[in-house]
Amino acid sequence: MLASFARMIWLVWCWVELSILTIILFSISWLPKRFIHSFYHKASRMWCRFFMRALGIKLYLHEKNTKPMPKQFILIANHPSALEDFAIPALFDVHPLAKQGVRDWFLIGRISYVADTIYVKRDNADSRHAAVEQMITALQQGKNIALFPEGGCKGRRISERFHYGAFDISLQTGIPILPVFLHYEAQDTFEWRAPFTLLDMLWRFIRSRNNRVNYYLYDAIYPGSFSDKISYSEYAHSLYMAWQRHYLE
């Protein structure tokens, strides 16, 4: 009973901290970008870390890689939940690809926009093409990007195939793919499925009796080993299927 009360007090304090930081970032987001560009992305990643703490999430990064991380990379991950939209930037210095609807989220949408999140309408070919161009530009500027090759939130099991976008960009730019496998121990709680909204999911995260989240980092995959995006994608997909068997089955 005492432990539960102490946790409640701790979470209340974490939400106070998060609220203060949110107000600050939202307020300064309206300043000319040239004044805030140098630090705003870093501040948005700090906001993500505060958010993880406010949700009571125990986020663990397991470094399964046997070689050093590349200086620049295209991070890919499976997409079973809503949490990774915030947890991945909390752990990795990336500019993520997000669905266009994120831009309209209250407060968060404005912060993500100024932090240079890349948006896409998945069912719109012109939007997908524009997003690819933005990601290539970001890489040419020395940034890292992150995206989900399943093409959206597909639940606790890996989809039958990966889309080719990340692998095509990797071949065009020579930037390696950095694979991260996401494992939520309380799969039923964290899986995002209809009819849950984002607020529903956040409440489920806070109430979860098992709030441990495991992100497994593996060795980068370099484009020089592949002649086309199809074989590149299929190879990465085979790795994720093997990790799924290891961690989830």
Image: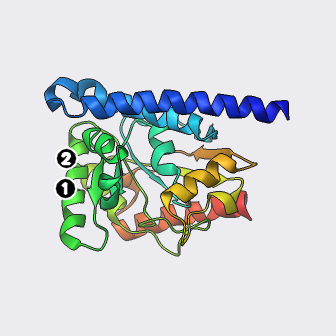
Residue 31 visible? The answer is yes
Quadrant location, the C terminus: bottom right
Quarter residue 168 falls in:
bottom left
Q: Dot 2 lies on which element?
A: helix
Quarter residue 11 falls in:
top right
Q: Residue at x 64, y 46 (%)?
A: 206
Residue 223 location, x and y as percent? 37, 54
Q: CA distance from mark 2 to mark 1?
A: 6 Å
Q: Is residue 42 left or right of residue 243?
A: left
Quarter residue 26 falls in:
top left
Residue labelled with disc 2: 137
* CA neighbours of label 2 inside 10 A, class few (<14), some (14 to 19), many (20+): few
Of 4 and 91, nearer the camera is 4
Q: Residue at x 32, y 40 (%)?
A: 111
Of 65 and 96, nearer the camera is 96
Q: Which mark is residue 109?
A: none
In the image, residue 234 above or below residue 5: below
Residue 65 location, x and y as percent? 58, 40
Residue labelled with disc 1: 133
| Amino acid on which the number 2 mark rests in the picture | Thr
In the image, residue 161 above or below residue 49: below
Residue 42 location, x and y as percent? 36, 29
